[in-house]
Amino acid sequence: MTVRIGIVGPGGMGRAHIARIENELAGGHVVAVTDIDPENAARVAEPLGATVYADDTALIEAEEVDAILVTSFGLAHEASVLKAIAAGKPVLCEKPLAPTADACVRIMEAEQAAGRKYVTVGFMRRFDRSYGEIKEVIDSGELGAPIIVHNRHRNPTVPESYTADMAINDTAIHEIDTMRWLLGEEITAVRVDKPKPTANRFPHLQDPLVVVMETESGAILYDEVFVNIQYGYDIRCEVVMESGTMALSDQNLTDRRDSEGARNKITRDHNERFHLAFNQELQQWIKAVEKGEHAGSSAWDGYAAAVVCDAGVKAIETGQTEPVVLIEKPTLYN
Ligand SMILES: NC(=O)c1ccc[n+]([C@@H]2O[C@H](COP(=O)([O-])OP(=O)(O)OC[C@H]3O[C@@H](n4cnc5c(N)ncnc54)[C@H](O)[C@@H]3O)[C@@H](O)[C@H]2O)c1
């Protein structure tokens, strides 16, 4: 069976997902497209031979569509995801699931009423092989319990439209989800330290930030978020356990040595660095849809990340450690 996919909002991320579904992955085909920019929808649909729908409602309800990929702006996610649940169709929604915790609760309530998990959130780092190897060691317990994690999330640059809270909601959200998944526990408090800002970019941005999180067991997680570091997209993570450490290796596949010295390639963006992880994420989702199963992170993960983000944004303003208070986890997500 080929899973017939309808995409809502194929911008940069959506087009990258379409390319992988059509050229690299098995079992899926994009048959339907909608975008608030109809010209974009038509441009994307034409080479696929896909149908253009006037809006997400029409696309989600279309008989020819089995599953939905939501890659529109964060603010638009909730409406499309709720419509997919109402139509009984699995939906992979790019992060954030929704920009507020309340919206994520509404999505979880709809899923609980429907009685099954329809929603997968696009936290692709869970499918990255090197993070996976770190998780295997943590889960095995052979190096003891994780105590400290040092994360670095560095982007070459961001557009002027990037706002201070996006450092948490858009950027650190990846470490927030990855840390919850790696350590298998919830984050309980957040503080944000503000080093002196880089002179390289916009004065309205407090860049870099250091996000400091605590977990249920008392582990401390550091996340340097530096979105205008100029030199490349550099994602690092070192987990310090009781009797050893595990870290992501440099992201190069080869090391070059020549008369200039020894150096390696730094990736430029998320698509380059996490290409294989995105492929795995989408491939497992397509396979799960085929079998009527759920794959990847759930609406609960989208909710928990949103609550930590809210606390992080508040912590930027207050300069204090802000508590993260989650609702009781519904049994559907246990
Ligand atoms: N997983 C990752 O690492 C990663 C990386 C980049 C972006 N993203 C996420 O992907 C999503 C899209 O980001 P992007 O960079 O592709 O943005 P983008 O601006 O390039 O694309 C968004 C598209 O959605 C369309 N759109 C907006 N609202 C809509 C609506 N209500 N109905 C239909 N179409 C609508 C826009 O016209 C545009 O074509 C965001 O949620 C972003 O956070 C995730």
Image (cartoon, rainbow, N blue to C red):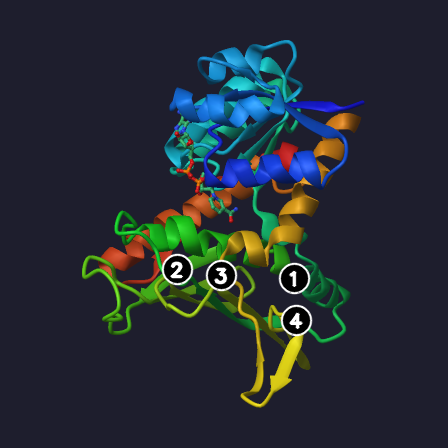
Measured Cα–Cα span from mark 2 to mark 1: 23 Å
Which residue bears the numbered disc 2?
A: 190
Q: Is residue 23 left or right of residue 261?
A: right
Q: Amino acid at mark 1?
A: Tyr
Quarter of the image with the N terminus in it: top right
What secondary structure is marked by label 2? strand
Disc on the earlier residue, 4 or 1:
1
Q: Is residue 287 left or right of residue 193?
A: right
Q: Amino acid at mark 4?
A: Ala
The image shows residue 175 at horizontal and vertical percentages of 50, 58
- Placement of 80 over or under 187, stated as above or below: above
Q: State whether residue 334 appears in this view.
A: no
Which residue bears the numbered disc 1?
A: 131
Looking at the picture, tell me which residue is in the foreground, 147 or 309. 309
Which residue bears the numbered disc 3?
A: 268
Q: Nearer the viewer, mark 4 or mark 1?
A: 1
Q: Mark 2 near mark 3, Cβ–Cβ under 8 Å?
A: no
Q: Mark 3 near mark 4, Cβ–Cβ under 8 Å?
A: no
What secondary structure is marked by label 4? loop
The image quadrant of residue 291 is top right
Which residue bears the numbered disc 4?
A: 145
The image shows residue 184 at horizontal and vertical percentages of 63, 56
What secondary structure is marked by label 1? helix
Q: Nearer the viewer, mark 2 or mark 1?
A: 1
- Placement of 97 over or under 141, stated as above or below: above
| Ligand 1 position by quadrant | top left
Measured Cα–Cα span from mark 2 to mark 3: 29 Å
Quarter of the image with the C terminus in it: top right
Measured Cα–Cα span from mark 4 to mark 1: 16 Å
